Amino acid sequence: MKRGYTLIEMMVVLAILAVMAGAAVPALGVWLDRKPRGVDAVAELMRDVRARALAEARPVVLNIDSRTGRWLLEDGASDSVEGELRLSGAELSTDGERIVIRFSPTGGSEGGKVVVREQGRLDTVRADQWMGEVRIDGG
């Protein structure tokens, strides 16, 4: 008794793989063409600030200038850290000039939101008041 695969079995497997690859290629193209959005930059910054508050077990305050996108972190122990959001043409929309979000040592927050206007769309990045979880709500 011979063991192994026949040529027909191998051709069937290759045909199935080719069909699966053909279905995946268009989706891969869409994923590769995806441009970073300003709302993603805001959410990433807020998640980083929350992680810092948890790691250092102390409150951390994030101050964002809504006009320029510049931000400042204050944790009361080390020198302040500052930077600038890469908004890719998006703009921050808020009631005032400054957006202040405080994260506690447990990762919770006093609540807070940043509204990002980009390509005619409004998205809101929120820090949950109790758990501090950062999420993006499309508008």
Image (tube, rainbow, N blue to C red):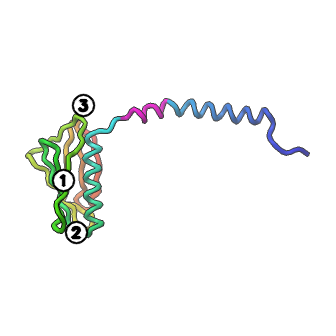
Residue 107 painted magenta: no
SS assignment at label 3:
loop
Say which residue label 2 marks.
Answer: 58
Q: Is residue 22 left or right of residue 6?
A: left
Q: Which quarter of the picture shows residue 8? A: top right
SS assignment at label 1:
strand
Q: Position of residue 129 (x, y in %)?
A: 22, 59
Say which residue label 1 marks.
Answer: 82
Q: CA distance from mark 2 to mark 3?
A: 37 Å
Q: Which quarter of the picture shows residue 22? A: top right
Q: Residue at x 16, y 47 (%)?
A: 70
The type of residue carrying mark 1 is Glu
Q: Which residues are magenta?
A: 26-34
Q: How many marks?
A: 3
Residue 33 painted magenta: yes
Classify the position of the C terminus by image quarter. Answer: top left
Sequence-wise first label, 3 or 1: 1
The type of residue carrying mark 2 is Arg
Dominant SS in magenta: helix
* Residue found at the very far front of the displayed protein: 79
Nearer the viewer's eye, disc 2 or disc 3? 2
Q: Position of residue 103 (x, y in %)?
A: 21, 61
The type of residue carrying mark 3 is Gln
Residue 104, relative to residue 114: is it above or below? Answer: below
The tag on residue 119 is 3
Nearer the viewer's eye, disc 2 or disc 1? 1
Classify the position of the N terminus by image quarter. Answer: top right
Q: CA distance from mark 2 to mark 1?
A: 18 Å
User: Alpha-carbon neighbours of circle 1 within 10 Å: few (<14), some, or many (≥20)?
Assistant: few
